[in-house]
Image (cartoon, rainbow, N blue to C red):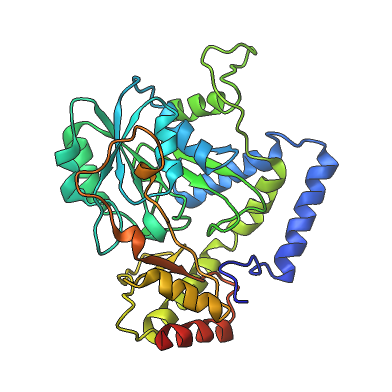
Amino acid sequence: MISFFKDSSAGKMERNKIMKQLMLVIQSGQYILGNQVQLFEEEFAKYCGSKFCVGVGNGTDALYLAIRSLNLEKGSEILLPSNSFIATALAIVHNQCIPIPVPILDSTHNIDPAKIKEFIGPKTKAILLTHMYGQLCDMDAIMAMANLEGLWVIEDCAHAHGLNKNGKYAGNYGLVSAFSFYPTKNLGAMGDGGAVLTNSAELAERIKTLRTYGMDENGTIPNTGINSRLDEMQAAILRVRLQNLDKQNKKRKELAKRYFKGIKNPKIQLPQIIDTHVYHLFVVTCQERDSLKNYLLSKGIETKVHYPLPYYLQVNHLPKPKSEYMLHKQLLSLPLYPGLASKNQHEIIQQLNQF
């Protein structure tokens, strides 16, 4: 079986470094918000070109806390792409705000900047965008629109570790951004983990308080928060893996180029070629998607669907978009991860062309 994802990218040297860091954590006896978390926050912020990083328990909490830090009124509306993981919408709902789906571009599946304005109403306070699959949204157009309309921009960077355009990194365009370190991510831990980035000292301090129940330095709770802290062990692992992130992203781009070069089936539409893409996912479009998925599985090739059902059809009481997003019935994600063997990718391409 050719797995969709296998965490086989760590070589012997990386594994040894990880084990050494984990032993340091054990010897320190400090397992929550210790030295490893502080160092990772500093190193990841520096890598992304951001002033502040706050490590949290997972990517969903990162989104929740990013929104929560803005102190939006109950019932405020937040625009988001119609194609996104359900966590993006849930983070809005859990903040007692209303998600408003905006159509996406067929070429990239990112939010369509030209469609944003028609969804802005008197209760609209922010745009929560996702750099889908590892490709940058049209940030120049989105930021210009947001500034004109007086809206906050929140970046969902769960697919976008190391993504940059002309040296400016994803997560450093809007007011605040959220990252997930789920094991399958470009920068993945060996468990759950997340982070919030911002250039605002005020927001960073607010998020630090909110991630620990809302407790201030005196041990009182002026604002009710949650319990969501990046684990010391996961921070230690992420510190090692951050050193290899650019190398791993380069490998992902090489694998993507092989797909672009090798797949020649007219039934299968390839994604747009984008230089800045970091290929968290390689997603093709096929009108016979389910048949293709089953065919590949019969040949021992595992694929995934991102995402089987739009979030607005899964969460009760969410407003439906004016034009329903239908591509979810055609999208299929192919295996692409740094440890994918050349012979396995050749087999995948061969079977795609034979379908």
Q: Residue at x 60, y 44 (%)?
A: 193
Residue 140 location in percent, x, y?
23, 50
Q: Residue at x 35, y 58 (%)?
A: 328
**In the rendered image, which quarter contains the C terminus?**
bottom left
Residue 252 location in percent, x, y?
49, 71
287 left or right of 350 in image: left
**In the rendered image, which quarter contains the N terminus?**
bottom right
Q: Residue furthest right?
A: 27
Front-lying residue, 276 or 99:
99
The quadrant holding residue 32 is top right
The quadrant holding residue 319 is top left
Q: Residue at x 42, y 27 (%)?
A: 95
Residue 167 appears in the picture as rendered = no
Depicted 132 relative to depicted 96: above or below: below
Depicted 314 relative to depicted 250: above or below: above
Q: Residue at x 55, y 79 (%)?
A: 298
Residue 31 appears in the picture as rendered = yes
Depicted 140 relative to depicted 232: above or below: below
The quadrant holding residue 177 is top left
